[in-house]
Image (cartoon, rainbow, N blue to C red):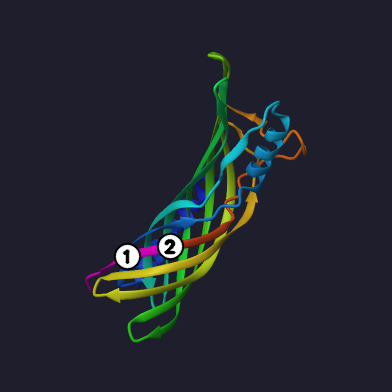
Amino acid sequence: MKQIAPIVILMLVISLQAKSQEYDLMFQTGIGNYSMSDLKGLNQSLLKTLPFEAKVVSDFPPYWTYRPAILVKFNRISIGASLSYQSTGSRISVKDYSGEYRFDMNVNAISPGIYAEVEVVKINTLQVSFYTSAEKSTTRLSTDEYFNVADSLLINEKFNLKAKSFSLEPGICISYPIMFFTFGMNIGYSFPMGAKAFYLSDNKDKTMSNTETGKAVVPKWEGLRAWLTFSYTIKKGK
């Protein structure tokens, strides 16, 4: 099953390329706003169990995201394969003369997918398009808990976990072509289409759950996306 998606994408691109006279090498970079409600809930549950007062100093803030893609252009439609990367994290921390406690969670995802764009309005050279990106993500989560009191190390634990999820990102794109180059801006929203619980990288049977609620903890990359888009058009010879 893991091999089906790449094969389908490759066959689709080859089929369209046979009828197309050009294709785009596209690169996007921007800011992603990530829900991560399950992981945020995990932080709040942890705070309640600590025997001392600590604070969440960072709680999965918006962060940079990147997406290269190869698109085949066919009339007003562009479609092809993409690969995105996104990351964020959190920290619970307290430190004074007696010691230090911190709990870090760093999360990132690599997401192959299909990117499609349809031109709907063209005013002189300015183009307005609708786009959709459908992706399958592999999310990696690393946790690091550290507790030191009076120079005595009480806790120093690190775990690596993984999770699978799907997402759909519709949005609008405004672009301006100059010769073989196109510059644009995309605004979209990523919707989760299903996610599975985090599991230990070396043991899939051990999954992460919130001990307070008893619910499984899953990655939630849902949120607003704002992209700057750069692409280079290559025209095929006759």
- Disc on res. 231: 1
Q: Position of residue 29 (x, y in %)?
A: 39, 57
- The type of residue carrying mark 2 is Trp
**Residue drawn at point x = 54 percent, y = 61 percent:** 224
Q: Name the residue that disc number 2 marks.
A: 227
Mark 2 element type: strand
Q: Of 23 and 20, which appears nearest the observer? A: 23
Choose top left, top right, bottom left or bottom right for residue 45.
top right
Q: Is residue 147 visible?
A: no
| Number of numbered discs on residues | 2
- The type of residue carrying mark 1 is Ser
In the image, 200: left or right of 20? right
| Residue lying at the far top of the rendered structure | 152
In the image, 183: left or right of 56? left
Q: Nearer the observer, disc 2 or disc 1?
A: 2
Q: Please state the extent of the stretch shown in magenta in the rendering.
A: 227-238
- Which image quarter is the C terminus in? bottom left
Q: Position of residue 71 (x, y in %)?
A: 38, 64
**Residue drawn at point x = 42 percent, y = 58 percent:** 30
